[in-house]
Amino acid sequence: MNDSSIRKFFYLLYWAGVLLGGIYIFKCVIGTINYFVIISLIGGCIIGIIKSQSQDDYLKQTIALKTDNRVLVYDYLRCVASIMVVAVHKIGADLAVAAEIQESNLYRNLDFTRLLCCSCNVIFVMLSGALLLQYRDEKMIFFIKRRLSKIAIPLILYFYIYYLFFSADGNIEKVSIGVLIGRIISGKVGSVHALHFWFMYVLLFLYILFFFLRYMLKDISYMLLSKMIIFLFVLSIIEICIPIELIDIKAWNLLGWCLIAIMGFWFTKDETRKYDKLFIIAGIVSAIAMWVIYINDSDSVFISSNFSVLRYFVACGLFALLYNLQKHLKNYFFIRFLSKYSYGMILIHHICIGIITPKLAPFSSLTHKGVGAIISILGVTIVSLIVAFFIENTFVAFYNGIFDVSLVRKIKKSK
């Protein structure tokens, strides 16, 4: 048996294992499996085998073994923000059933930790701006195609997974595929108990705007860019301190998210490095200020709003810290793996919280003087990551593969 035959056999063995893992995930974790899912899982593995044979490093990519061309600062930021997302919802789920100890120090500390971790939304949008607002000479059709394959297609498929999960145990009624598609298009995330999907819809709209924004920012001077960032902080203060009812809230929010993305782009500039220490200090001071505000008014918009200037400083402080430490960051496998599957992990983690919480009851956020929170957050993160790995490489991979083939054919016809 020559090397080529051994390699092909290994590919078949690997993708057979991925297929079995995908079937197990749907059967035992999601709780239901149908012919549509089975065909999709098999199709995803066939695409995986084809890509493994045609691309030498494809298999390495699926398990994050490829280490070149990585920006470790972004990997670390994505990992920290992903864990913060899990912390927000895991702690929130545990506190929701602990109203009787609402006045205890443990409850308040955990609730404040949850609020502090809500800065993850700002971090993700800043990270998107840092990555996607860099100018590239790229056709619009290819830009949108990449965003659809990375954001829209997984979002649609995970929406369907949530529908399967909650309709299987009778939590929501079963509906026709037409009704479900209508809910996906209109963003009715509450209909499948996936309220955290709202943020993915925001990202999808932002990514479409980014194509035009990158041309606008192409030749902008650093001084003018800095003034835009100052405007963002001023805008945040205005929004919180002066209610402006005449402005449509959706358009106002979209403007706010766009400016946050531009702030992420601003952080990539070499000139910004001179402000790193200042932002680190500002981030620490802002976290302390949030605690002081929380003690006096836990519902204050200064700590609960996504557009809080304090959240901006916390996110900027984290950016500045990691940029400052970038020469010392290690290229660990876990960091690469979590970074690669962070989007799928975020989409699926709500289901994993519901499944894992009863099994981790001895380690809920409220046990072991709060240490249980660390254990349970880590547990949910790891399980969500494993589930995301199998879903992404089977169910999602199949439809991304179909999308890629159909797009190539359309491009060829247009020529």
Image: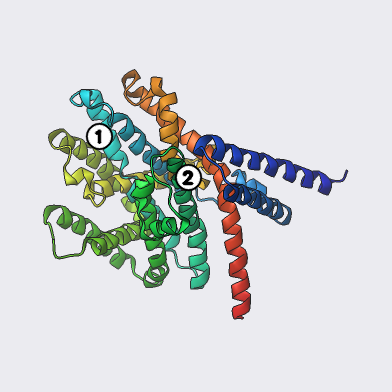
Q: What is the residue that sits farthest to the bottom in this orientation?
A: 415
Q: Give the residue type that dot 1 points to.
A: Phe
Left or right of 38 on screen, residue 209:
left
Residue 289: x percent and y percent? Answer: 19, 39
Q: For the residue carrying disc 2, how many other residues have a C-alpha within 10 Å: few (<14), some (14-19), or many (20+)?
A: many
**In terms of sequence position, does the residue under pointer 2 or pointer 1 come before the other?**
1
Q: Which residue is mark 1?
A: 112
| Quadrant of res 215 | bottom left
Are circles 2 and 1 on residues that touch, CB within 8 Å? Answer: no
Residue situated in front as seen by the camera: 332 or 341 = 341
Left or right placement of residue 324 versus residue 147 in this view: left
Give coordinates of residue 95: x percent, y percent: 28, 30
Report helix, strand or loop for mark 2: helix
At 81% from the left and 43% from the top, the residue drawn is: 6
- Tally the numbered discs: 2
According to the picture, the residue beneath numbered tag 2 turns out to be: 164
Whether residue 12 sits left or right of residue 291 in the image: it is right
Per the model, the C-alpha gap separating discs 2 and 1 is 34 Å
Residue 35 vertical placement versus 130 (above, below): above
Residue 269 visible, this orientation: no
Instruction: Give the foreground label among 2 and 1.
Output: 2
Identify residue type, mark 2.
Leu
Between 40 and 237, which is closer to the camera in this rendering?
40
Question: Does dot 1 land on a helix, a strand or a loop?
Answer: helix
34 and 261: which is toward the camera: 34
Residue 133 spot, x, y in % from top left:
41, 63
